[in-house]
Amino acid sequence: MFLVRPLKTILVAILASLTLVSCSGSNKGDLLGSNAQVTIYYTKASDDLGVVLIPVLRAIDKKSGAYETALKELFLGPTLDERERLKLNTEIPEGVRLIKIKETPNQVEIDISSQFMKGGGSETMQVRFRQLRETALNLAKGRPVYLYIDGVKATTIGGEGLEVPQPLGSSLQ
């Protein structure tokens, strides 16, 4: 009986240590638990509403961080299961790459490849932009988010020159 109290104390100390170690091993300043997730926005056709955005959760790759995981997953598109079972799709063209993310306490800068601008008319570009914007703003925590394409701050996208509001918080013109 006299061993029970020291064993409880040791177990509590071990559990507390494990909790602190798991939190201190976080990446890029985020306290990511083992179940940390990001929200990605894909598309779905609706008879009544046209194309709508559908949020999907993805586990955060702790080596990459939340933003990098979210954008890479967005660019990969829905899984085969999501495409078949949920009828999800994306307007993001194949081959779009994340070049760089720069996060500061005051803002976020996202630099992506120019494949983002390939193909599609004005409706496609608007939906494509909304997918990117909603995914990015969801992680911004109130910070402004700026979009760069191949290292240049985006002012327009698509052949019809849809204006890109900077920061991304407002809608296309």
Image: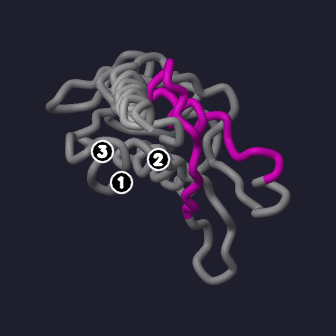
Rendered image quadrant of residue 117: top right
Q: Which residue is mark 2?
A: 129
User: What secondary structure is marked by label 3?
Assistant: loop
Q: Amino acid at mark 2?
A: Phe
Which residue corresponds to mark 1? 172
Give the magenta-colored segment's residue range.
Answer: 53-81
| Count of numbered tags | 3
Assign a secondary structure to mark 2.
helix
Q: CA distance from mark 3 to mark 2?
A: 9 Å
Residue situated furthest bottom in the rendering: 48
Q: Is residue 132 above or below residue 14?
A: below
In the rendered image of this protein, does residue 119 appear above or below residue 27?
A: below
Which is in the foreground here, disc 2 or disc 1? 2
Q: Residue at x 57, y 39 (%)?
A: 59
Task: Name the image quarter holding residue 154.
Answer: top left
Q: Residue at x 58, y 62 (%)?
A: 54
Toward the viewer: 81 or 13? 13
For residue 166, above or below residue 90: above
127 in the magenta segment: no
17 with respect to 103 (left or right): right
Residue 50, image x, y percentages: 61, 72
